[in-house]
Amino acid sequence: MPAFKTLRNKWKEILIGESSTKPITIYEKRIIDDLDRRVESIVAMLCQDKNRIYLWKDEADFTNSQCQTNNYRRVLEMSKVYSIQGSHYYKSEMLLKIIEEALSFLYEHSYNANQAYHYGNWWNWEIGTPITLLNIMTLLGDDLSKDERHQYCEVINYYQPDPRYSGERSSNERLKKRISVGGNRVDTAKIAILLGIHTENALLIKQGRDALSSVFEVKDYRPTEKFIEKRDGLYRDGSFIQHRDVAYTGTYGNVMLGGLGEMLCLLNDSEWHITDPHIENIYQMIDNSFIPIIYKGHGMDCVNGRGASRQQYRDNGTGHMIMTSMLWFCQVAPQRYRDRYKERIKYWLKTDKVSSYIEKSTEIASVRMALAILEDDKISAAAELEGNFAYNYMDRMIHHRKHFACALSMSSWRIRTYETMLGENKRGFYTGDGMLYIYDDHQEAYNGDFWATVDPYKLAGITVVDKELEDEQGSFRTPSKWVSAMSIDDLYGIAGMQLDKRGIDDETGQIENLLGIDLKAKKSYFMLDNEIVALGCDITCSNQEQVETIIDTRKINKEERNKIYQTSRSIYIETDKEKTSTGYYFLQEHDIVIEEYTRIGNWFTINVNGSPEGIRQDYMTLAINHGRMPKNASYAYIMIPSITREQMESYQKHVPIRVVANEASMQGIQYKNRMMLNFFEKGSVPGIQVSQPVSIALKDNTHYIEVTLCDPTKECGESLDLILDGNFEYVAGDTSLIELHQQESYIHLNIRWQEKYGLPITFILKNKLNSEL
């Protein structure tokens, strides 16, 4: 039927670009030439023995399910050059014969329906290999026989028969038939749609399209273990969680986004076009969840899960993949979103100084879309993003300013310290312990070989015991329920965590000292106009090893000029590059240790798929030494990124921050006319009293007080009683949740936050003594 053929051709254009009579650009020629070179190598390495037991010697272990997918991916590369005009291999009969024979071999020896269950990683059998094989079939079309196409579709349907579920053929009891969610749901829906196109099954296309609707839903958090088991997906605060307890916007979230964008483009203007009105949630998610995790084209690793350890991506690679996903939405989203996305993409294309998207992209279609935006004078580049983005349900906070950005990564009873599996991210030990990422014009800070060479015990922001861990150790949820991130006026941020190095055993659910580390601390972060304030207290550890808080660890080049200026209260690190120098101001006395050193590492050490080749990288670390077996140790400092030496000298004379409290029960600061407090238990400071743990910020504008608060435990078992000194008569904001009782000299507010589950509540109190508002 014409409708199915139209969709097949459309998907082919998405894969390799639309056929064009225009001369190919230098960027398209570069992509085609690179593909030709890779295929030349693939063909040269191919085993030609008639009795062969593998196709490629380096991918011969078919007991490893990834090997199966990798073989199909090489066939896909050959299929691309066979189908792309301008390729040396375009419509090559020799290459087509090699492809057909390779597909036949893989069907006979690896991917067939003769096995009751699959082995290895379920993903390869149900997603990785099926999508790759469907793409190969799309590119080759009628050059494959009807019988070949039929048998390949049959085996795909055998392993992935229903887009709503995964695990139909799993031999793992834990991974038996289950609802497919998040990024995986988009992939299973995509398989159904493409399989429906190839088998001309309209019902299957409809089932695939309808299966996408579940990922349009926005979840509301609930603090129960039962909910934790089913919490993958997108949340009201912009969080995206996959694998139950991992912050995953940049990897699985982008798989979801990219797949949705492609399916929207594919099905647009067809009888199966997506009509679910909840797709609006995805358009908003791009603004709220994806744009904030990119800084000048670089994706932030704090939301990449184990993907941060993958050598082939790194942070600019992650940024590029998210841009590709957004480019598809630029073709079909409503105009009000489309224009905004294009402006943001143009800004990233212009400000990424490390790796040009257009020069590095491997897809012709995405290069054409990006060039269209870059060369369109009617599209203005967006301004630099400014704002604070709190992702409370995945224990993350992102902060953007004109000349820098900051990301914070925490962990809790809800969110895992880090993810490691399948030999990936083997040393992410402390990335969820309050790690701070500072992004400035030094765009190589976390790019390049950072993760392969950085000392995993010296990550900025963490408080750590100097004890060596074994690979993959320490990946767990912690007993801590007080972990919070809250934005104020979408401009400032207040975050905090109770650090507890005990873990929740994945098998038993019991709290155990799985690392042999008895470290506890209270940590708070305040993200302001030009600075980040870090407070730590109640730092207690019975281990014999030294304990320290890492202020910063940064890549340096010893051959470049890096000057350190130090006073009793401050350190200033001056670099040669503009807007990359950083100031540190200390709000109390510390034993500061400054180290410059060279690290030698490799990607294989942290990821089995990485290269074992040694890499050298120079680093500088600033740390606070708490000594051995500290009791109630503390720290308090300010980081001021992208500041000149003159500005730093001026800043020290007029520091706009005062520590209100830094003790076991509470931490807080006064910043200009704002009070920002983390109460770890009920307590008070002058003028403020609370009945239970709360994260709260008050802005005093003389005529009124603006209050923003949230439950940091997200359990909201009882109403919060808040008492403020003063006379007030007016409440605006979330008034339905607030009961007000004015006394002679104070106001008593009962805040019914039970149904907010950690989301912020904002309201305004008007001063009786001044009627202006």
Image (cartoon, rainbow, N blue to C red):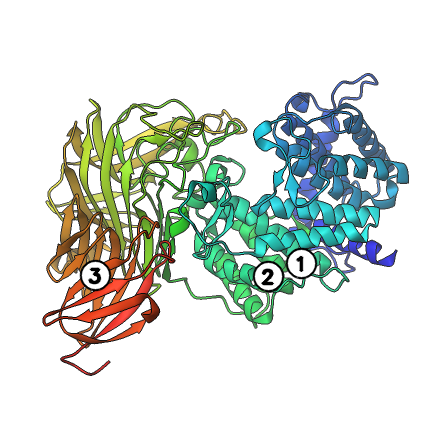
Residue drawn where x is 22% and y is 33% of the image: 548
Q: Residue 264 carries which label?
A: 1
Q: Mark 3 is on which residue type?
A: Leu
Tell me the quarter of the picture where residue 691 sits. bottom left
Q: Rounded to the nearest whole Å, what is the CA distance between mark 3 and mark 1?
A: 48 Å
Q: Considering the numbered disc 3 on the image, is that residue within a helix, a strand or a loop?
A: strand
Q: Position of residue 437 (x, y in %)?
A: 35, 46
Q: Rounded to the nearest whole Å, what is the CA distance between mark 2 and mark 1?
A: 10 Å
The quadrant in which the N terminus is found is bottom right
Q: Name the residue under label 3.
A: 722
Q: Mark 2 points at which residue?
A: 279
Q: Mark 2 is on which residue type?
A: Ile
Mark yes or no: residue 356 visible: no
Q: Where is residue 197 in the image (x, y as percent from the top left)?
A: 79, 50
Mark 2 in CB contact with mark 1 (< 8 angstroms): yes
Residue drawn where x is 19% and y is 83% of the image: 771
Q: Earlier in the sequence, mark 2 or mark 1?
A: 1
The one of 154 and 429 positioned closer to us in this rendering: 154
Q: Position of residue 603 (x, y in %)?
A: 47, 29
Q: Is 717 left, or right, of 158 in this rendering?
A: left
Mark yes or no: residue 202 visible: yes
Q: Where is residue 638 in the image (x, y as percent from the top left)?
A: 21, 50
Q: Mark 1 is on which residue type?
A: Leu
Q: Is 544 left, or right, of 187 in this rendering?
A: left
